[in-house]
């Protein structure tokens, strides 16, 4: 019998109600973290990854915009400031499609626990903040498998923005949303852009079954909560190293 991969739902004319839990027929599992820049999501996923690696679990890590097939084109477009909201979105979609076909899906079918730092919801939030149609974005990524858990790390806008600006000497052009002409001041443009993204994420909490995490909670406490949720929702035993039978 053929394996059926649950896919990201396409938006209909009516506002969707809370999504039902996806039916997962491959042996692997997919855990995703989302949130605006400075929300703490990457730190928490890294800590979860290290914990699982130390435990010997079969895992694979992937992150947004990391496909070698697309990276050089994206870099050139950014350097020359040639990317429109649509072309930028298409490059991200091509990057995701390459990683999905070569990494995510094969490993899910191979029985791995896949950890993703940002997923299609990044496009739904960020590209929509750049003016792309939410319905078009949903259609574009409709082939993506539905995560078993999507952690949404939410931090107040001021907290998240301060974390980023305090640690970087200068915000990058596209990172700050300067291509949108929001403001001539890079820091102000970044703040407004991040606020738009935050609002888009908030609208997906119920419809996409996000697990809401408080990004202002202490790192160790937040990590403890994350591990507990993963243990409750996913059978980690199926990803643990097989014990050798005694002779």
Image (cartoon, helix red, strand yellow):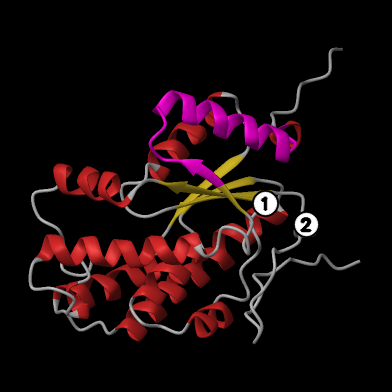
Res. 101 visible in picture: yes
Number of on-image labels = 2
* Percent coordinates x, y for residue 199 in the rendering: 41, 64
Does residue 86 appear left or right of residue 187 in this picture?
right
| Residues drawn in magenta | 212-236
Vertical position of residue 147 compared to residue 137: above or below:
above
Rendered residue at 42%/31% (across/down) = 217
User: Cα distance, mark 2 to mark 1?
Assistant: 8 Å
Closer to the chain start, of discs 2 and 1, is 2
Kindly check if marks 2 and 1 are in contact, taking CB atoms under 8 A apart as contact. yes
Residue positioned most to the right: 1
Helix, strand or loop at label 2? It is: loop
The quadrant in which the C terminus is found is top right
Q: Is residue 208 highlighted in magenta?
A: no
* Percent coordinates x, y for residue 175 in the rendering: 23, 64
Res. 24 mark: 2
Q: Is residue 229 highlighted in magenta?
A: yes
Q: Nearer the viewer, residue 113 or 163?
A: 163
Q: Quadrant of residue 242?
A: top right
Q: Quadrant of residue 146?
A: bottom right
Vertical position of residue 58 compared to residue 194: above or below:
above
Which residue is identified by label 1?
148
Rendered residue at 38%/45% (across/down) = 155
State the predominant SS element of the stretch in magenta: helix
Res. 65 visible in picture: no
The quadrant in which the N terminus is found is bottom right
Q: Residues within 10 Å of mark 1 (few under 14, many from 20)?
A: some
* Percent coordinates x, y for residue 134 in the rendering: 50, 80
Does residue 130 appear left or right of residue 136 in this picture?
left
């Amino acid at each position: 019998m053929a394996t059926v991969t649950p896919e990201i739902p396409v938006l209909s004319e009516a506002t969707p109600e809370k999504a039902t839990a996806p039916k997962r027929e491959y042996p692997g599992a997919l855990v995703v973290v989302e949130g605006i820049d400075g929300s703490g999501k990457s730190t928490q996923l890294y800590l979860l990854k290290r914990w699982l690696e130390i435990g010997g679990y079969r895992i694979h890590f992937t992150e947004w915009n990391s496909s070698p097939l697309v990276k050089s084109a994206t870099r050139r477009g950014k350097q020359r400031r040639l990317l429109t909201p649509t072309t930028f979105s298409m490059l991200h979609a091509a990057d995701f499609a390459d990683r999905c076909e070569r990494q995510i899906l094969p490993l899910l079918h191979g029985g791995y626990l896949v950890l993703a730092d940002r997923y299609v919801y990044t496009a739904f939030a960020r590209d929509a903040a750049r003016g792309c149609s939410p319905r078009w974005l949903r259609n574009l990524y409709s082939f993506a498998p539905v995560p078993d858990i999507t952690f949404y790390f939410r931090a107040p806008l001021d907290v998240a923005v301060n974390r980023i600006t305090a640690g970087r000497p200068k915000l990058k052009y596209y990172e700050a949303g300067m291509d949108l002409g929001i403001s001539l001041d890079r820091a102000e443009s970044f703040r407004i852009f991040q606020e738009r993204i935050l609002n888009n994420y908030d609208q997906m909490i119920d419809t996409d079954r996000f697990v809401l995490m408080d990004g202002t909670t202490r790192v160790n406490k937040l990590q403890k909560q994350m591990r507990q949720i993963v243990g409750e929702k996913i059978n980690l035993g199926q990803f643990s190293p097989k014990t050798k039978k005694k002779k």
